[in-house]
Amino acid sequence: MNTRIAMVTNVLDYVGPPAVKALIESGYRVVAQDPAFQDENRQKDYQTNHPGTVPLGLRDPKELIQHVCDHHQKIDVLVSNDTFPAIHIPIEDADVEDLKATIENVLIYPFRLMQEAVPRLKKQGYGNVIMITSCRTELPLPGGAIPDIARAGANALVKSLSIELAPFGIPVNAIAPNYLYSEAYFPKAKFIDNPIGKNFIREVVPAGRLGEPEEIGELINYLATMKGSFHTGTIIKFAGGWPAAPTRPI
């Protein structure tokens, strides 16, 4: 049987866990990359608890893509799950080093990853790219310039990649969450267990709650398993109807 191979980056954070779960349930063998797996004990524990995965601690994009292609001969689905703490601070108080670090992790790293992956995808003649970005730029807020700049660039990267790979039948799409439950951005203790945070979500998000990991997993599964390549270049907002007018006057 020809096993389908998916690769997911930063599997321990943001959309990593639901992406891995959805892809395994769809029959993929998942190469699960995370820098934390440089610790052999964490790598072994993850593989034990997630049958069907191949955890890797490689960080360098060239080494990572080379390793996957050498050991698995192909990449059917590539999920670039890019995450970094959202630093909110007025521009006049911001540290440029924080801007550089944010751009490095959510824009430059996926750019470098795709530089290495694109020739391989073209050579094999197929593949499916899913990039995890953010729709936070639809309603910029004071103090949000650093993450907004980086995420806007990542969404632009998706558009550019899609038109470059469309002639080769390789779709490139983004899922752009906001108000998705993850310990990285909307932790349970603050936005689910805490009544103040929970009420804030009810007022701001038309759906009245945070998005569930299983729900974004459904979307990843759709994009990963679609048979056609005409659906490409989309930034799919996953935000429960946000932004919209508040549910009650404030």
Image (spheres, rainbow, N blue to C red):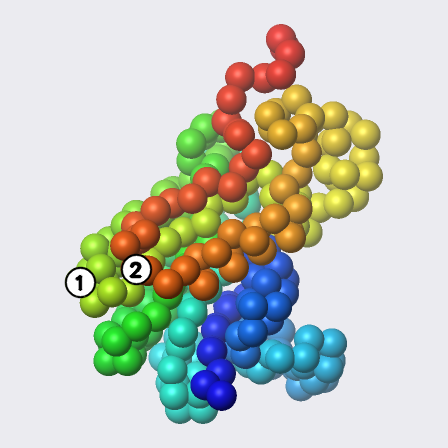
Q: Residues within 10 Å of mark 2 (few under 14, many from 20)?
A: some
| Residue 161: image location, x then y, percent | 26, 58
Asked which secondary structure carries label 2, the reply is loop
- Amino acid residing under circle 1: Pro
Residue carrying label 1 = 167
Name the residue: 50% across, 68% down.
Answer: 9
| Residue 224: image location, x then y, percent | 45, 63
Name the residue: 56% across, 68% down.
Answer: 26
Q: Is residue 100 visible?
A: no
Tell me: 45 left or right of 60. Answer: right
Residue carrying label 2 = 229
Q: Residues within 10 Å of mark 1 (few under 14, many from 20)?
A: few
Q: Quadrant of the C terminus?
A: top right
Name the residue: 30% across, 72% down.
Answer: 126
Can you tell which quarter of the image residue 162 is in?
bottom left
| Residue 238: image location, x then y, percent | 51, 41
Name the residue: 38% across, 45% down.
Answer: 235
Q: Residue furthest top?
A: 249
